[in-house]
Image: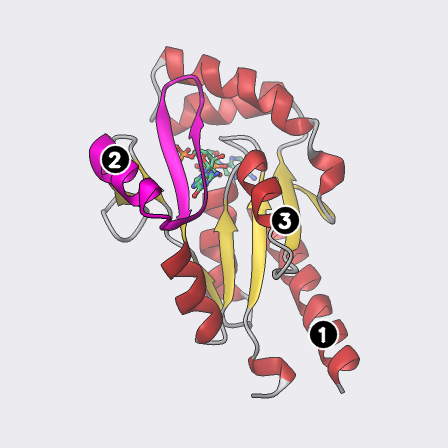
């Protein structure tokens, strides 16, 4: 396998409502790299447009706990004061990397720090935010998927998450989606070139 066939991990974090899912979806469509999104497991209720095995693996509390005890997660955590669990499945990471994919983990800051503690990975870390908490609140409200309680919890968490910004290699302000997609695609293309240089 040559350097360009090797899988890579990409971590994308940022406050809920920053536009991560929107940007990642378009990035995968438009950027000419073998990008694929890792599908996380969660105990939260699916939103109207979400599908099991596509957006998340939606698990019961019991099933999530069983898989946690079984050691199936690379990282997992309980999020947002609303008691929902989220976790990255080891099998998703192994399958993606073994297939030579550039696997995107769209995970929260604590999950990201946990993955970074696993020294065998050298993830490209990207922090996305909308430039201000007011805009974040506007996007969460416009998305129309959260209760008032959930929005409040997400905004409270966002302030803490922003303090992790400097732990990421790249900061991307999601002002417009096309610009954010272009910027991230360029970051990844540069990483690919660097990778090839260092291996040649
Ligand atoms: P996240 O995955 O970070 O929680 P989403 O991708 O669900 O965020 O985006 C939150 C809301 O903001 C959605 O309604 C989405 O359409 C909207 N959105 C995403 N990016 C932008 C942007 N650059 N400008 C305005 N609205 C955006
Ligand atoms: P949402 O409920 O809006 O889909 O996601 C809420 C938050 O959970 C987001 O910040 C998202 O990045 C994070 N998240 C999603 N999947 C995982 C995961 O597997 N692990 C961790 N640690 N966080 C996750």
Closer to viewer: mark 1 or mark 2: 1
Q: Residue visible at 51% across and 42% down?
A: 20
First of labels 1, 2 by sequence position: 2
Q: Secondary structure at mark 2?
A: loop
State which image quarter holds ligand 2.
top left
Can you give x and y, in whole percent of width and height, for residue 45 in the image? 25, 30
- Marks 1/2: CA–CA distance: 38 Å
- Marks 3/1: CA–CA distance: 19 Å
Give the labeled residue for mark 1.
195
- Give yes or no for contact between labels 3 and 1 (Cβ–Cβ under 8 Å): no
Looking at the rendering, the stretch of residues picked out in magenta corresponds to: 59-88
Can you give x and y, in whole percent of width and height, for residue 4 in the image? 61, 81
Can you give x and y, in whole percent of width and height, for residue 158 in the image? 58, 23
Give the labeled residue for mark 3.
116
Looking at the rendering, which quadrant does residue 127 occupy? top right
**Viewer-proximal residue among 120 and 200:** 120
Q: Is residue 175 visible?
A: no
**Which quarter of the rendered picture does the N terminus lie within?**
bottom right
- Give yes or no for contact between labels 1 and 2 (Cβ–Cβ under 8 Å): no
**Viewer-proximal residue among 77 and 39:** 77
Q: Residue visible at 48% across and 69% down?
A: 97
């Amino acid at each position: 396998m040559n350097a360009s066939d090797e899988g890579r991990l990409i971590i994308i974090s940022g406050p809920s409502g920053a536009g991560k899912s929107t940007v990642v979806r378009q990035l995968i469509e438009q950027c000419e790299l073998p990008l694929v999104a890792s599908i996380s497991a969660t105990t939260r209720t699916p939103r109207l447009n979400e599908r099991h095995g596509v957006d998340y693996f939606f698990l019961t509390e019991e099933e999530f706990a069983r898989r946690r005890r079984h050691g199936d997660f690379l990282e997992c955590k309980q999020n947002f004061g609303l008691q929902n669990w989220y976790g990255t499945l080891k099998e998703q990471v192994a399958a993606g990397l073994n297939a030579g994919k550039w696997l995107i983990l769209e995970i929260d800051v604590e999950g990201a720090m946990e993955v970074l503690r696993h020294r065998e990975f050298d993830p490209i870390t990207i922090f996305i935010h909308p430039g201000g908490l007011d805009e974040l609140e506007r996007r969460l409200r416009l998305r129309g998927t959260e209760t008032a309680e959930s929005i409040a919890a997400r905004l409270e968490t966002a302030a803490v998450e922003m303090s992790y910004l400097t732990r990421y290699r790249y900061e991307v302000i999601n002002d417009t989606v096309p610009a954010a997609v272009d910027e991230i695609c360029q970051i990844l293309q540069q990483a690919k070139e660097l990778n090839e240089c260092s291996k040649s």
